[in-house]
Amino acid sequence: MREDGVITEPVAAAVRAAEAAGHEVMLSTGRSEGMTIPLLDRIGIRPKYVVCANGALILGRREDGSYERVHVERFDPTEVLQTIHGALVDAAFGVEDETGHFLLSGNFPDDTMTVSGEHVPFEQLLGVEATRVVVISPGHDTEDFLQVVERMGLHKVSYSVGWTSWLDIAPEGVTKATAMERVREWLDIPRSRVMAAGDGRNDIDMLRWASTSGRGVVMGQAPSDVVDAGNELTGGVADDGLAAALDALPR
């Protein structure tokens, strides 16, 4: 998906063609359930499973084509929220539960949260059973933000920085890779037959996982640390690079 939200027809057609050829095609995303299901309709696929919230939520397809939550990872974000709140004074915080509902504290620009949330005092975020915590700090550029996060020592949770000054925090040990490995086992697909494509820092673990025996395809616009996580490089999103990668799948 381009930054303006467009999924081009060549990319959507390549995804549908891969599914039609018999491949298990699915989305693995940091987005919530409510933001992800409409994308399936836009692309025109109905996979058996969908990974949301950076691996904390796995959806399974019902017989009627709708989706239900088949695996949920949760955590108490209190400690990490208090740690970050003390280090990033002007940051805004969002806590997402398994239904995709957000409790928000602080100023989230309109273009950062495409789903509605309930604005509450910071203290009301503490103790919530969360699948994901989102932190934005507009006053920091990416490298500065990364350094601040590293100094916090957030070893008790999994975290990744998406675009500038955006931090996604998941339950400990939970990433897109752990969820995809769970799905791979459910579907009984050999590791050598796995392909994953991504371009963000929340894709690093997934790309490393796929690259171990299969294909970890990095989009051309990805930063260098993401490129290092994969074993294959395709064109950028503006050049429909995903379509080119999918066209190389066996038919």
Image (cartoon, helix red, strand yellow):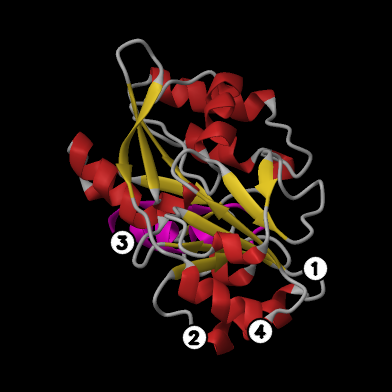
Q: Residue furthest bottom?
A: 151
- Indicate the position of residue 159 as horizontal and vertical percent values: 50, 68
- Indicate the position of residue 72 as horizontal and vertical percent values: 34, 46
Q: Earlier in the sequence, mark 3 or mark 1?
A: 1
Q: In the visual, does 181 lie left or right of 169?
A: left
The residue that disc 3 covers is 212
Q: Which mark is residue 153?
A: 2
Label 2 CA crowd tier, 10 Å (few <14, some 14–19, many 20+)? few
The residue that disc 4 covers is 87
Q: Nearer the viewer, mark 4 or mark 2?
A: 4
Name the quadrant containing residue 93. Answer: bottom right
Q: Which mark is residue 138?
A: 1
Q: Which mark is residue 209?
A: none
Above or below 79: residue 217: above
Q: Earlier in the sequence, mark 4 or mark 3?
A: 4
Disc 1 residue type (three-letter): Pro
Q: Is residue 219 magenta?
A: yes
* Cα distance between the residues tagged 1 and 4: 14 Å
Residue visible at 59% across and 58% down?
A: 200
Q: Earlier in the sequence, mark 1 or mark 4?
A: 4
Disc 3 residue type (three-letter): Thr
Disc 2 residue type (three-letter): Gly
Q: Nearer the viewer, mark 4 or mark 3?
A: 4
Q: Earlier in the sequence, mark 2 or mark 3?
A: 2
Residue numbers of the magenta segment: 201-222
Residue visible at 25% across and 43% down?
A: 184
